[in-house]
């Protein structure tokens, strides 16, 4: 889930980096909407408003959509790596795809509301992120995560940029194409093909925002049939052109 309101981002502790992409905190929100773009992640989002907390699990999405926000509220997020929410949430990624579900009874760990606040009843980012690390580290120490073949394939897709045919990943899984697709969708929430396309778009955004390479060269390097193919996928996932989305990313990083 990509947040529009420029949150504070924090990486998890070393013990959690196989499972969690990052934490984020958006205080005193001033926006009415934020845009969610496909990234293969399941997020736990906690809204704090008027001293009350409300938690939702947001599943992987297959296309860009807007989610309403409440002004002056605080938002806390845990963004899990693709396929890793299963260690922390009592629902498969497939059950959460394109949905948001209340956290009541869904978390495998105990997240006490009072843990989210500092001694004065406010939210201080360093204390908050340290507390989240502590809670989640204790959970995986008590319930050791079980590794899946899909975990390795997700790592291969991430490291290679999603350019290989899906049939290659099915062979790596030692399963038939149908069995592999079912396992991948159950674990990650979306198909292996769609996840590969998302990873490739993310790689393109990084190259566009960090290099001076022409778009046509980036499209060729990442295995798109042509620049038009790359642009069409960007519009599907982000409702934006590659160059426009990269400019937004640069502006966000500079801020």
Image: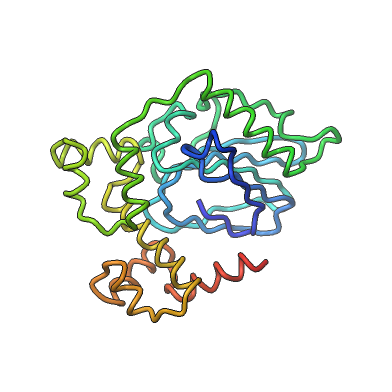
- Residue situated in front as seen by the camera: 211 or 76: 211
Viewed as shown, does residue 199 lie left or right of 111? Answer: left
Residue positioned 50% across, 27% down in the render: 106
Residue positioned 28% across, 47% down in the render: 191
Q: Residue furthest left?
A: 176
Judge whether 254 appears above or below 110 on screen. Answer: below
List x then y, in percent, for residue 131. Answer: 68, 32
- Residue situated in front as seen by the camera: 70 or 154: 154
List x then y, in percent, for residue 155. Answer: 36, 45
Q: Residue furthest right?
A: 120
Viewed as shown, does residue 235 lie left or right of 88? Answer: left
Q: Residue furthest front?
A: 14
Residue positioned 39% across, 57% down in the render: 63
In the picture, the quarter occupied by the C terminus is bottom right
- Residue situated in front as seen by the camera: 237 or 30: 237
- Residue situated in front as seen by the camera: 239 or 241: 241
Q: Residue furthest top?
A: 142
Viewed as shown, does residue 134 lie left or right of 215? Answer: right
Residue positioned 39% across, 37% down in the render: 93
Judge whether 146 appears above or below 155 on screen. Answer: above
Judge whether 221 appears above or below 194 on screen. Answer: below
List x then y, in percent, for residue 50. Answer: 77, 40
Find residue 123 and report its image quarter: top right
């Amino acid at each position: 889930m990509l947040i529009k309101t420029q949150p504070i981002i924090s990486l998890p502790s070393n013990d959690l980096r196989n499972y969690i992409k990052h934490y984020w905190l958006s205080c005193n929100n001033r926006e009415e909407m934020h845009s969610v773009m496909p990234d293969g992640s399941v997020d736990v989002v906690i809204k704090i408003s008027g001293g009350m907390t409300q938690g939702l699990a947001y599943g992987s999405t297959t296309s860009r959509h807007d989610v309403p926000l409440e002004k002056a509220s605080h938002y806390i997020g845990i963004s899990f790596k693709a396929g890793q929410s299963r260690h922390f949430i009592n629902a498969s990624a497939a059950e959460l795809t394109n949905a948001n579900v209340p956290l009541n009874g869904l978390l495998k760990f105990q997240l006490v509301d009072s843990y989210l606040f500092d001694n004065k009843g406010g939210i201080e980012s360093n204390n908050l992120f340290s507390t989240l690390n502590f809670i989640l580290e204790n959970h995986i120490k008590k319930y050791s995560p079980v590794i899946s073949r899909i975990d390795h394939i997700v790592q291969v897709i991430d490291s290679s940029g999603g350019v290989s045919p899906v049939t290659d990943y099915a062979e790596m899984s030692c399963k038939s194409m149908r069995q592999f697709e079912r396992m991948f969708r159950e674990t990650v929430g979306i198909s292996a093909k769609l996840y590969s396309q998302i990873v490739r778009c993310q790689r393109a955004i990084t190259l566009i925002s960090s290099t001076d390479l022409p778009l046509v060269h980036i499209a060729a390097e990442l295995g798109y049939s042509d620049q038009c193919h790359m642009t069409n996928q960007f519009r599907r996932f982000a409702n934006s052109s590659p160059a426009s989305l990269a400019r937004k990313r640069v502006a966000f990083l500079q801020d």
